[in-house]
Image (cartoon, rainbow, N blue to C red):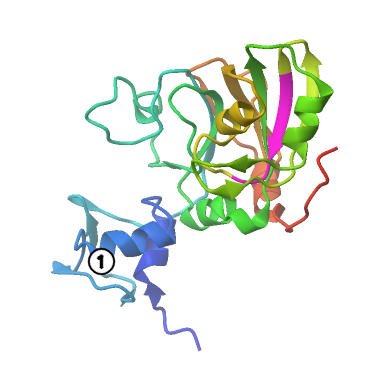
């Protein structure tokens, strides 16, 4: 029987604050209030309860919003960073609060997805789902098939003590290649290229799952269509590819 209760971390996720996992951390840190008392991890709420975070009363989610944003180089993927010159949030003037689903390092550019649906963020960022992310990579040396094959098979990253999953690599011209990965390790493609004897000069993400950057100019964003959002929800079957 439906008691009308909802777990607080789910409510925070549906309000666009963060993912459920991050919501539990916020609750544990005492940053969330329910009816003016400090919330506890695992707490449930019912209709009419007053939930507050950072001085803002949360209303829950009425409609899923997903934005595609073309992050310029030099912009930090963060909502708050006192040391950053420019943040992603500086470019997003939208009436609904959205949170990014997956980071892109400061020196890189291209597609970032932002949404008010914390469950969707969890789904997109879960490494076990093998979601594809495609990058156009420009390097300092002429690219050879030998280098590409090394990347395709997976490459050991000593700084992270991990071997990358097999990935797809296609040579576009002498110094540019398309790289499609299914994980999101810290500065992964830059580290992979270093191990293959290449230095990345430019890194641009052009696709996340079924969503492409398209004609978005740096600093611009657009709303995803219902079909694109449906595709994001349906993606992630755990399918692996052989790097070809």
Front-most of residues 183 and 156: 156
Residue 183 picture location, percent across and down: 62, 46
The answer to whether residue 146 is left or right of residue 34 is right
Q: Quadrant of the C terminus?
A: top right
* Residues shaded magenta: 177-183
State which quadrant residue 27 falls in: bottom left
Q: Secondary structure at mark 1?
A: helix
Residue matched to label 1: 28
- Establish if 91 lies above or below 211: above
Magenta-drawn stretch contains 181: yes
Residue 100 picture location, percent across and down: 46, 40
Identified at 80% across, 33% down, the residue is 149
The answer to whether residue 3 is left or right of residue 52 is right
Q: Is residue 42 visible?
A: yes
State which quadrant residue 205 falls in: top right
Residue 155 picture location, percent across and down: 67, 40
């Amino acid at each position: 029987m439906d008691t009308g209760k909802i777990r607080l971390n789910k409510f925070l996720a549906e309000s666009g604050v963060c993912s459920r996992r991050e919501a539990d951390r916020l609750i544990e840190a005492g940053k969330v209030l329910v009816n003016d008392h400090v919330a506890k991890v695992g707490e449930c709420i019912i209709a009419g309860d007053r939930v507050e975070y950072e001085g803002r009363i949360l209303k829950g989610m009425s409609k899923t919003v997903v934005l595609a944003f073309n992050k310029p180089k030099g912009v930090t993927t963060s909502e708050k960073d006192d040391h950053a010159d420019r943040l992603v949030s500086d470019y997003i003037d939208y009436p609904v609060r959205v949170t990014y689903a997956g980071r892109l390092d400061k020196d890189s550019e291209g597609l970032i997805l932002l949404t008010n649906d914390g469950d969707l963020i969890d789904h997109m960022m879960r490494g076990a789902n093998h979601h594809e992310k495609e990058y156009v990579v420009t390097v300092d040396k002429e690219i050879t098939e030998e280098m590409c094959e090394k990347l395709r098979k997976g490459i050991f990253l000593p700084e992270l003590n991990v071997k990358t999953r097999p990935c797809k690599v296609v040579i576009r011209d002498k110094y540019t290649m398309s790289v499609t990965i299914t994980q999101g390790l810290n500065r992964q493609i830059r580290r992979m290229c270093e191990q293959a004897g290449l230095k990345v000069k430019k890194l641009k993400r052009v696709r996340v799952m079924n969503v492409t950057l398209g004609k978005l100019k740096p600093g611009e964003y657009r709303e995803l269509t219902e079909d694109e959002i449906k595709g994001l929800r349906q993606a992630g079957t755990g399918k692996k590819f052989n790097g070809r």
